[in-house]
Image: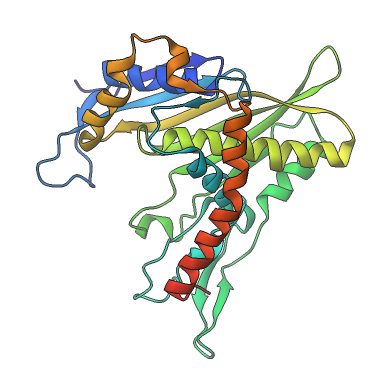
Amino acid sequence: MKSIPVIHVEGGSLASAYERALVALFNEGIRIKTQYDKSGDPASIDATMNITVHEPLSDPMIHKAFPGGIEDLREYVMELSGAKDHWMKNMNDPDDTRWEYTYHWRLHDYGTWKEKSNDSGKQVVAGPFRINQIEAVIEKLVNEPYTRQAQMITWMPDIDPECYDPPCLQSIHYRLVEDEDGVNYLNCNIRFRSNDAWGANFMNMFGFIQFNKETIARSIEERTGKKIGIGRLNWHADSYHLYGKDIDEFKKRLLTRIDEPFEKRVYNFSDPMIREIYFEAEEKIKKKIIEHDSKHSVL
């Protein structure tokens, strides 16, 4: 085969679309090696994937098969709000092995990175410019709700080609659509250059659905006084892949259960027990971050 397959799946809820995307990838993707394979790893399964979630906030929202728990979802949402921005490395310190970026930093402080000052040794923010893209798209949508220019990007061509693990998320594009009742719905397109279908995709999609609701839509509501709903999410991955090392786990946790009733494979996010676990996890996660900081002398 000389061409990478292009696959499109749709689902009413996040859990439905996620499951359909994984099964379609397994059935229609091609085998291909990656630069992260270890000796003896099977080739990954890869495709270009487009996932449309028509009702991102609808239940069933959470798929039981994703390799994580409810508390992990809460932690990722907090990360997208900046809770771990201070875990980024000093770019001019070769001994610093921390993260080269966070998505929140790239969206909130695009154009900058962290360095150690040659004079004081303290951590400083450097870069040719600093743009809060989150604030920019909110203001754009408030002032021109019909705009096609509400977009954020992460890729920084001056540093990312040399990164070992550059950002997978590439861009986020928003548009508002008004229905017959006068409610504006925030539609969103998200593009990833590379998306780990098993190890990361569900958490990525869940996280940005919450980000869109809590950060973008809520801010527009507060500034305009208008109701802002969450419209469809279109998720595009240039490389949507299932690593060879994960294929057996995928089969065990999802593929072998595909003939069971769908309701047995999912959770409703509106379930009081699920919501209790989710929201009560915040204090535990804050303590976890503080403990990590104290052990690693994070500034």
Number of marks present in the image shown:
0
- In-image side of 5 versus 66 (left or right): left
What residue is drawn where x is 58% and y is 40%?
278
- Image coordinates of residue 69 in percent, x first then y, are 45, 38
Q: Residue furthest front?
A: 273
Say above or below: 106 vs 264: below
Q: Is residue 238 left or right of residue 291?
A: left
Q: Nearer the viewer, residue 118 or 61?
A: 61
Residue 133 higher or lower than 197, as above or below: below
Give percent across and percent down for residue 134: 68, 48
How far from the left and from the top, in percent, is residue 209? 60, 33
Residue 119 visible somewhere in the drawing:
yes
In this view, 176 is above or below 261: below
Identify the residue at image location x=63%, y=40%. Answer: 211
Residue at image coords 63%, 64%: 129
Colour scheme:
rainbow
